[in-house]
Image (cartoon, rainbow, N blue to C red):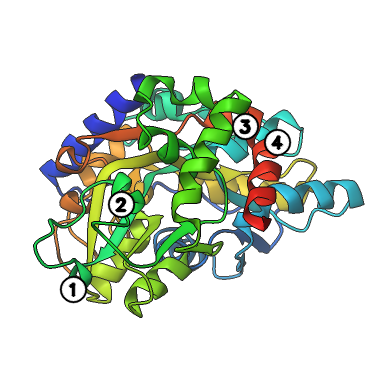
Amino acid sequence: MKFRTILLTTGAALTAGVAFAGSHGDLGECENCANKITLVSWGGAYQASQTKAYAEPYMELFPDVEIVWDESSPEAVAKLRAMNEAGNITWDLVDVEAADAIRLCDEGLAMEIDADEVLAPANDGTPASDDFGDMLVSDCFIPQIVFSTTFGYRTDMVPDGAEPPNSACAVFDIETYPGKRALNKQPIANMEWALLCDGVPYDEVYELLETEEGQNRALAKLDTIKDETIWWSAAAEPIQLLADGEIFMGSSYNGRLFSGIVEQNQPIGMAWNWQMFDLDGWVIPDGLPEDRLNRVLHFVKFATDTQRLADQAKYISYGPARQSSAPLVGQHAELGIDMAPHMPTDPNNAEDTFVNNYGWWADYRDDLDAKFQAWLAQ
């Protein structure tokens, strides 16, 4: 797969950890621009990394601009649909996963962009379209990071005589690893893991998941741990559950787990095998007034340059989505630790990986959301 190749190449570059000062360029003042911008994201450690890498430096250059954060990305699709229907778009730039970006673009709720016009070129002048490459999965998508959904576990709760879990499939092994689990309250990743860990070959998972038989098989596998599972909807929840010792094992975003392990010094280990790779980035809501759109485009040009994407990876263990940024990532900006071993794209963490088929989920998400929530309510 092209996507898999790019991820591993990025990981190799991160391993090199080459330091490079780079240049953010001189944007100049923003003509006919609003002085307030509302950014929508996920809260927690991820939003903090965006604040440090993008928002604070931008406001230092342009002190008259106010940046307001909204932590509604988990409900971005539904809320943008409602705003569009009401004719009142209150958001300016929205952080979403790739599958949701495709859905929003297909529905005309996100603005199509010319990558080479809207996004910053690489430091050496390489056009954005070449530098981001296959990460540009939609005409509306502005890629930021490569991340993964994977599993953390309490290192002090591993049963005597048992090996620490190293795979997503361990979540289904109640006998070896007793205790409560935590899973995201949505079908993405859970359905794929259920089939994969029930013996379905990797390259047949989505084909089977298109069928009622495959969907029922996935839910039947999840039934085996349903009574032992706490279902989370906010990304901070599984980290807190692990920190409190309320669960043995839980799925989360690798950057959140990094924060719990390295920044909070919690007794948490990572089970990397069959981590679910995905992309995350911005979309611009369609139909913004001219002054707000001008401000958004000005900010996006600043926030997508080579150094800025590398800077975000200095605060959280997500790989930058443009190739030229990878060699610029070295140590954590505050802790001074090498970030490469903590990246999902590092070859040591990418032995068995599952690449999220975001195009597939864009087509099937609404139907499977309804089926999954009905199953949860049973």
Query: Can you tell which quarter of the image residue 122 is in?
Result: top left
Write down the quadrant of residue 352 in the picture: top left
Instruction: Tell me the SS state at disc 2.
Output: loop
Q: Looking at the picture, which amino acid does disc 4 mark?
A: Asp
Secondary structure of residue under mark 3: helix
Residue neighbourhood size for the residue with mark 3, other residues' Cα within 10 Å, grouped as few (<14), some (14–19), many (≥20): some
Which residue has dot 2 on it?
Answer: 173
Circle 2 Cα neighbour tier, 10 Å, few/some/many (<14 / 14–19 / ≥20): some
Q: CA distance from mark 4 to mark 2?
A: 29 Å
Q: Report whether residue 270 is seen.
A: yes
Tell me, yes or no, whether the two marked residues, 4 and 3, touch with CB atoms within 8 Å.
no
Say which residue label 1 marks: 156
- Which secondary structure, mark 4? helix
Where in the figure is residue 330, as x and y percent of width and height? 18, 53
User: Disc number at residue 362?
Assistant: 3
**Tag in front: 3 or 2:** 2
Pointer 4 residue: 367
Q: Amino acid at mark 1?
A: Asp
Q: Earlier in the sequence, mark 4 or mark 3?
A: 3
Quadrant in the rendering for residue 264: bottom left
Residue 121 in sight? no
The reply to whether dot 1 and dot 3 touch (C-beta < 8 Å) is no
Choose mark 1 or mark 2, whichever is in front.
2
Residue at the image point whose x is 52% and y is 32% from the top: 358
Question: Which sits earlier in the primary sequence, circle 4 or circle 2?
Answer: 2
